[in-house]
Image (cartoon, grey):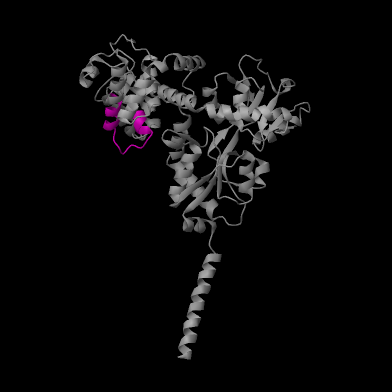
Amino acid sequence: MIRFLKLLIGCLCSVLLSHCDTTVSQTKLEKIKQSGVLHVLTRPDPTTYYQNADGYAGLEYDLITLFAKHLGVKAKIEVPDTFEEILSKISKGEADIAAAGLTITDARQQTMRFAPAYHGITEQLIYRSGTRRPADINSLTNGIIEVTKGTSHVDTLKQIREGNPTLSWEINDQLDTNGLLYLVNEGLIDYTVADSNQSTLILRFYPKLNIAFDISPSRQLAWALSPSDDNSLYDEVVVFFNRIKADKTLEQLLEKHYGHASSLSYVDNCQFRQHQKSRLPHYQHYFNVASSQYNIDWRLLAAIGYQESHWLADAQSPYGVQGIMMLTNDTADLLNIKDRTDPAQSIEGGARYFQQRLKIISDKIPEPDRTWFALASYNVGMGHLEDARRLTAQQGGNPDKWMDVKQRLPLLTEEKWHQQTKHGYARGNEPVRYVENIRSYYDLLVWLTEENQIQNDAMAIRKPAESEAAYVLQ
């Protein structure tokens, strides 16, 4: 009996020791998978992570979501109060990954480890229209330059100052670059610095802003991980980025977030803002009603209406389409619309017709591509859209991705290609412009209905800045 108890105790000890050894030897990646949670740091910005009517969005959010799915875990997203805090936390190992649009710099590589780059940018000096555009860095002797503390922009300016000792700037430790861009737009500071991807998106929302010139060569954005001898998580991130580059997922995500950003001219942008104030209020109620009835974001419906008619109830084209949603006679008859110039009937009919288009598009096509295809069919018809999708497949593209199909739609204007299709010739450039413009109008409407928070934050911090507590002169 005693011998049996000794054997039993020995076995139990072996099991416990074995368990302890396994726990001690667990890699970083194994711990994440066991906990089921990936701890990620990011920042709120149109280029990274933000909330819209459908939930959270942004390039970094999409990448984080895909990587968490790749690991089979959930992403726990933390948004520190300042940009500098993101760098501090990841350097100290207080999170697994910093996915915040971080530029790879020599200084940062001393305290963190960068994953493979996913996007190239330059750093740009931003100024306000109506003021003199600086010709080069040597002409910045007058005026206030402000940059956000902890950003690569500070290091870039320091490098420039080595050859230009008179260059000076102020560091803001409370506002992010988005807030500083707002201050430039309002004429409260003269200049700031932004990454080119941020400029691409933000300048649509602040049409008074302009790019003076690049202040850096091409730089790379990447995720940052804590420095460690444990390569398990880093190696898995490398595998992930290699995969999404090879299967074009990364390219498609970049198109999703940046592909339409330059579709509107400065004049178009300003005109849209004027009409949003003067015309949209007359029809806002009808868009809200249709939105509730068909479960479509009212801003998307309004964007369609603006692209169609610039929100004019009596609009009419040479082709016989009429009203805010520019319905044809045949479509109006199909929808039982009696008066196409009646705003309520037109908007309800347009929403119902768009919903029908959406239902026709295969549900195997993921969003947002499914919506872009539905919009294209609203403009050019399902037959021509299917012709373009078939051409896309024949040429080795993905017929379920708007990024690939929008390259083939213009081919429908060329006899060489449209004679191979079922439905023949179509003005294929039009649905491409149509969709890209609506995407831009939608983004602007989202911004214009939510931008007050940025304004309030920037102004709340700016007012006590007279004390210079928030600034460090460089």
130 inside magenta stretch: no
Q: Nearer the viewer, residue 25 or 179?
A: 179
User: Left or right of 399: which side holds 101?
Assistant: right
Q: In which quarter of the image is residue 439?
A: top left
Looking at the rendered image, the quarter that the N terminus falls into is: bottom left
Image location (x, y in percent) of residue 393: 32, 34
Q: Which of 219 and 233 is in front in this view?
A: 233
Q: How many marks?
A: 0
Residue positioned 26% across, 15% down in the render:
328
Q: Main secondary structure of the magenta part?
A: helix
Looking at the rendered image, the quarter that the C terminus falls into is: top right
User: Left or right of 322: which side holds 138?
Assistant: right
Q: Which of 90 and 249 is in front in this view?
A: 90
Q: Quadrant of residue 179?
A: top right
Residues shaded magenta: 353-373
Which residue reaches farthest right?
165
Q: Which of 85 and 240 is in front in this view?
A: 85
User: Left or right of 315: which side holds 190?
Assistant: right
Q: Quadrant of residue 289?
A: top left
Image location (x, y in percent) of residue 51: 47, 35
367 inside magenta stretch: yes
Residue positioned 46% across, 28% down in the render:
259
Image location (x, y in percent) of residue 83: 62, 39
Image location (x, y in percent) of residue 122: 60, 31
- Is any part of residue 420 visible from this angle? no
- Is any part of residue 74 visible from this angle? yes
Image height of 449 relative to 105, above or below: above
